[in-house]
Image: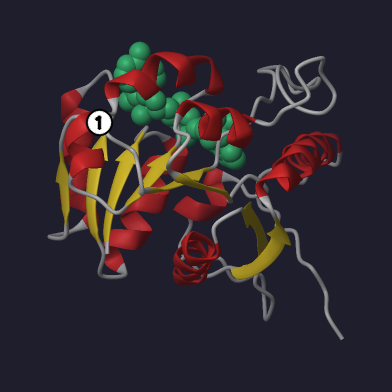
Amino acid sequence: MKVGIVGSGNMGGSLGTLWARAGHEVIFSYSRDDDNLCQLATLAGERATVGTPAEAVAQSEVILLAVGFPMLEAVMPTLGALDGKVILTCMSGLRPDFTGQTIGLPTELKISVAERVQQLAPHAHVVEAFNITFAEVLASESRQFGSDRPSIFYCGNNPDAKKIVAGLIQECGYDAVDAGELIVARSLETLATAWVQFAVASQLFPDLGLKALRR
Ligand SMILES: NC(=O)c1ccc[n+]([C@@H]2O[C@H](COP(=O)([O-])OP(=O)(O)OC[C@H]3O[C@@H](n4cnc5c(N)ncnc54)[C@H](OP(=O)(O)O)[C@@H]3O)[C@@H](O)[C@H]2O)c1
């Protein structure tokens, strides 16, 4: 599959690297330093290249949006045609000091980051995932915690897009858990805030995974 990374920082860099190593064609884009992008692609292997955000989108079926939420409104108009694309967003509206969110259920805006992405790209298939993990875990050797693998909750309105994202989650070494439709992103983003706050308060950050237990 062709995956365009828009925002090649801690999350985008690590996820793109894992997908390239899993056999996908990955295009890294959106950095203030082109050398960073080139270095990332070199380290990720022969299936990784670099491009502009518009090139990454045009050449890919799946787009990972991994920019800081304050950049979203400026980035979206630069991406070109998004109709029919799967947009995977891991973005959150977490405040830099972790005290809460700038968008989402606990705010007057109510809607989630993922729903805002859907508003900006109404004919794309938006799926939210990877909010409740840390980039440090993605960048580490493995997602295993002993015999356990952490869960990644994902939500969206298009079943085919969700199936693709579930596969991408599993290829990173996580257990993929379907959390429902895109409106659930409101709750997942709030859960992610609580998760970060817990991780910091407990001094367990960042070597931590959340798991949905089943029996
Ligand atoms: N970090 C986590 O553990 C984590 C976990 C879950 C969700 N998230 C969410 O995922 C999203 C990305 O987080 P992150 O930690 O990966 O952030 P990050 O490391 O800061 O990455 C942001 C990317 O945007 C690029 N960028 C920023 N401003 C730019 C500009 N003006 N022009 C061009 N490129 C620009 C950065 O490029 P350069 O810095 O290379 O210039 C970098 O590639 C955020 O919404 C965050 O809330 C993060």
Q: Can residue 143 be seen in this view?
A: yes
Picture coordinates of residue 79 (x, y %)? 29, 28
Specify the quarter for ligand 1: top left
Residue located at (77% from left, 34% from top): 193
Q: Tell me if mark 1 has few (under 14), some (14-19) or many (20+) residues whose alpha carbon lies within 10 angstroms of its own.
A: many
Left or right: 182 as drawn, with respect to 212: left
Q: Going by the image, does 114 lie left or right of 5?
A: right
Q: Nearer the viewer, residue 89 or 173?
A: 89
Q: Is mark 1 on a helix, strand or loop?
A: helix
Of residues 96 and 110, the one drawn nearer to the viewer in this rendering: 110
> Eyeballing the image, is 148 above or below 123?
below
Which residue is found at the position 69% from the left and 53% from the top? 181
Q: Quadrant of the N terminus?
A: bottom left
Judge whether 72 appears above or below 208 on screen: above
Whether disc 1's CB lies below 8 Å from ligand 1 is answered no
Front position in the image: 35 or 58 = 58
Pick the front one: 133 or 165: 165
Q: Residue drawn at (39%, 33%), measured in percent from left and top?
A: 9
Where is residue 47 shown, x and y percent of the image?
16, 60
Q: Where is residue 80 in the image (x, y as percent from the top left)?
A: 25, 29
Residue 185 image point, x, y percent: 70, 43
What is the three-letter code of the residue carrying label 1?
Pro
The quadrant in which the C terminus is found is bottom right
* Residue at image point 66% right, 18% down: 96
Looking at the rendering, which quadrant does residue 168 occupy?
bottom left
Q: In the rendered image, is residue 150 in sight?
A: no
What colour-coding does the image apply? secondary structure
Q: Which residue matches tag 1?
A: 53
Q: Taking 29 as reference, is 103 left or right?
A: right
Q: Residue pushed farthest bottom?
A: 215
